[in-house]
Image (spheres, rainbow, N blue to C red):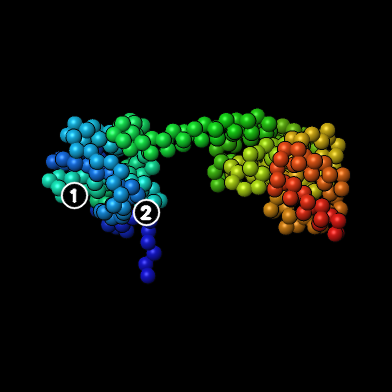
Amino acid sequence: MPTLDLTNRKPLEERNKLPTPTNEGLAKLFIGVDKVVIKSDGVYETKAMSDKIVLTISQADKIEKLNDLLQIDENNTGFYCMCLGTYAIELYSNKDIKATIGFHHGVSIRYHYWDGDAELAKSDELLNFLAEQGLTKPLYERIEEKRNMEADRIAQRKWLDIAPKCFQKYWTQICSMDSSYFVPLVKDINSEIPDRQQQIITLLQTFGKTENFWTAYPIYEELPNDILKTFETEEIIKAYLNSDRNYKTRKGLGRYLCSFEFKKTRKKYLKHITTEVIDELEKCFDNIGEKRGINEIFSLRNEKNNS
């Protein structure tokens, strides 16, 4: 049985024969249209995937306005969203469906007879227009998305404030799957923070700066952990014991010692993880109300006691 391609793409050879999305082509789809029906879910090939109608537009001036607001950015076409869309826009002429356009996440559209998707040039105006007609969900989702993006930017700035300064130099690569920066970054850290103990403390405090210690955290939070792996566990514990042992450092050390990766080999390092360290990590996680952290330290203590 063939696998369903949720991008709804034709084979490349066929796509190369199709026209590129243009505003002129889009305008032609609207010629003679006297009603627009928007349905929930997306479009598979040429048909809406749902019968649930969320908005109907039948006034000529508003149909014309919709056509204008669906204007595409002709410099950004030919890509494919990895789904079938969030809404279907059906264009009717004399009670017959003339065309069905897939509407994707408030930012792009897809028409089956184009060679790819097209980014919308007036997406914010379009979402406001749809909200005025009664379809408010896409606008609310956009507002929430922007709110989350701003919260993410604030979190990134706070994280970079305590991270080694050279992290900013490699920020684009850090936030991508490109790992070629790692060796030169480590070299830069050695120049920025020559003292190895202070380097460890800085990395621990950076690793401890998180809203999610164990899962669903941003990819960049893994970097200090990756660098800490280049140190001996005994050296990390010694650096902690020689520090002022504040909660910023404790959170990072607790997260490091209880990370999924480290737990695979933790048993052979238990001799370096003293009961005193475990007690202080437990006190830290208990004080900040990190329930899973408390459970992780409990498991660490049991391993220590049974070793």
State whether residue 192 appears in this view: yes
Q: Quadrant of residue 203?
A: top right
* Drawn side of residue 41 relative to residue 296, left or right: left
Q: Nearer the viewer, residue 178 or 303?
A: 303
Q: Residue 93, percent across and down?
A: 14, 45
Within 10 Å of the Cα at label 1, are there few (<14), some (14-19), or many (20+) other Cα atoms?
A: some
* Drawn side of residue 235 relative to residue 121, left or right: right
* Drawn side of residue 296 relative to residue 5, left or right: right
**Residue most toward the bottom?**
1
Residue at 47% x, 33% y: name it: 146
Which amino acid does the dot numbered 1 rest on? Ile
Q: Quadrant of residue 276?
A: top right
Instruction: Indicate the secondary structure of the residue bearing disc 1.
Output: strand
Could you tell me if the residues under marks 2 and 1 are in contact, i.e. CB atoms within 8 Å?
no
Decide which of tag 2 and tag 1 comes sooner along the chain: 2
Q: Nearer the viewer, residue 189 or 278?
A: 278
Location of mark 2 (residue): 7
Which amino acid does the dot numbered 2 rest on? Thr
Q: Nearer the viewer, residue 7 or 296?
A: 296
Q: Residue 164, percent across and down?
A: 68, 33
* Drawn side of residue 192 relative to residue 236, left or right: left
Q: Quadrant of residue 153?
A: top right
Separation of marks 2 and 1 at Cα, in angstroms: 23 Å
Q: Residue 284, percent across and down?
A: 77, 39
Residue at 35% x, 49% y: name it: 41
In the rendered structure, find residue 97 and report the number of the disc placed on it: 1
What is the total number of numbered labels drawn onto the structure image? 2
In the rendered structure, find residue 38 and report the number of the disc placed on it: none
Q: Nearer the viewer, residue 133 or 268?
A: 133
